[in-house]
Amino acid sequence: MEDRLPRKLAAILYADVAGYSRLTGEDEDATHRTLGEYLDLIARTIESHRGQVMHYAGDAVLAKFDAIVDAMSAAVAIQNELKTRNEDVPDERKVQFRTGVNSGDVIEDRGDIYGDGVNVAARLESLADPGGICISESVRTAVGRKLNLDYEDMGAQEVKNIEEPVRAYRVVMEEKKEPATTATDSPALELPDKPSIAVLPFANMSGDPEQEYFADGISEDITTALSKLRWFLVIARNSTFVYKGKAVDIKQVVRDLGVRYVLEGSVRKSGSRLRITAQLIDAENEAHLWAEKYDRDLTDIFELQDEITQSVTAAIEPKLVAAEGHRSERRSASDLDAWHLVMRAMTHYGRMTTKESESAIEILRQAVEKFPDYGPAHSLLAFSLLVSDHVGWIPESADLTQKASKLAHRAAELDNEDPWAHLALGYLAFMERRTERTVREYMRAIELNPNFATAYGYLGWALVFDGQSDKALKYFQQALRMSPMTRSLHFSIRALASLITLPVDTATQ
């Protein structure tokens, strides 16, 4: 059996001239000149929105984008510019493009893209009005409220050569007017000292009232799970559910709730299948930090709700930490508070090299010295010293373990509910081959943060070295399921894969 060709997720834009045959029949030369001018404009607009023109086919153009919002912004910019250029042209001579935008898997080969993702974009184009844009359900869900546009649901459309009906939406090209501010408008809330996130109510896209409870439950459970992450301020459910069923601008959420990050999503049921989508947005600049979709069979509704909550929460935490780390790197070291020093250190440590580990430890030492009562600085410094010494990233030191022990116990004194403090204490016990104490501390870290993938990974590691490979296996699998892209987990698990029955392909996915 031949290997399946590699595919990648992309946003696809397909545009074609409406009534091109009639236009060329009436005046071929003028039509061709205008077409060439417009295609050049379209190409420039696509490139300026971080897209790539893949090919031209007569009067049609195909382009791909890495980000759905970029594809949509380009489509709107193109149609607005062409509308301006056509204002003084008689209706019968206007060269107008229909545009379709889709998101899906494509095969990229020999400088072009192929596959159902492209085919659906072409079919959506045929459903669009001249000068208009038609988008798929996946695009509509991903864009959410990030663009100041309205959308009309066209329902499920039967289209040529596509087996399943395509849910289509017409983009209302006239931008929505921003509500006028008045003297009675409440002032925008200031951002708190530590990063803040609001989980908006997940939208029920099924038309099935029964799924309303499931969508609300997902939102509430994710809010509760994120509240266990002590790095962040999480807005309470009562404050976010005022937006339920409303088309809310992200900037308005920032103003109302004083948050830096927003999580939004949707739930759609089709037969016995559920599709849950979620996306994380940096509300300051509306940048798209993370998005994922989960397709599941609707069996045990509560088990499914727990699984999705755990998956989303575990995926979000490293993205938030990374975003805060990058934000801190843009500021002067003298201007950083305890939180941002720790985030900058975590950014360095996560790169898993000797040089980056040394940088992280130096920053954490500064944080401990400057903020002696800030527990996370102590716990992370203790953990970083222990791991870096163990894997040879820093020179061996006779008193290093003693220093780390002092830091870890001080962290627990300052904040006994800091999961990183118990992770560090567990690692100390592991180095002393005290398995029972190791397991107890790691389990305490997991109890404090049930989505702490790193703790699951190190717990598995400790059990392997105690000869409990069967027990270790489930913790390794849990760690990888929660955080499949965390380099430190892969570093440990791949090294141990040959010692237990964990399949190598599971450990390296």
Image: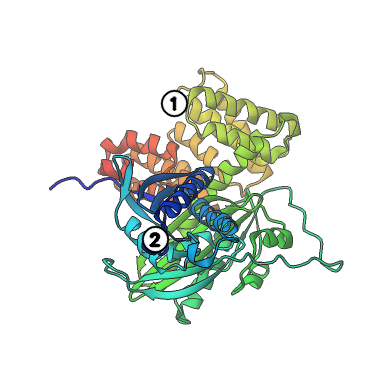
Which residue is painted at 53% across and 27% down in the image? 357
Q: Secondary structure at mark 2?
A: helix
Q: Is residue 25 left or right of residue 223?
A: left
User: Quadrant of residue 270 in the image?
Assistant: bottom left
Q: Is residue 444 visible?
A: no
Q: Earlier in the sequence, mark 2 or mark 1?
A: 2
Q: Nearer the viewer, residue 135 or 260?
A: 135
To which residue does mark 1 refer? 391
| Residue underneath mark 2 | 20
Where on the picture, by quarter, is residue 165?
bottom left
Residue sitting at x 40%, y 73%: 269
Q: CA distance from mark 2 to mark 1?
A: 66 Å
Whether residue 238 sits left or right of residue 128 in the image: it is: right
Question: Vertical placement of 171 versus 439: above or below?
Answer: below
Is 61 in front, or is 422? Answer: 61
Residue at 64% over, 37% down:
342
Q: Quadrant of residue 137?
A: bottom left
- Residue at the image position 22 percent from the left and 48 percent from the top: 4
x and y, in percent, of residue 161 in the image = 26, 66
Element under disc 1: loop
The image shows residue 367, relative to residue 80, as above or below, that is above
Q: Amino acid at mark 1?
A: Val
- Residue 423 vertical placement versus 69 (above, below): above
Residue 21 spot, x, y in % from top left = 36, 62
x and y percentages locating residue 239 in the rendered image: 68, 68
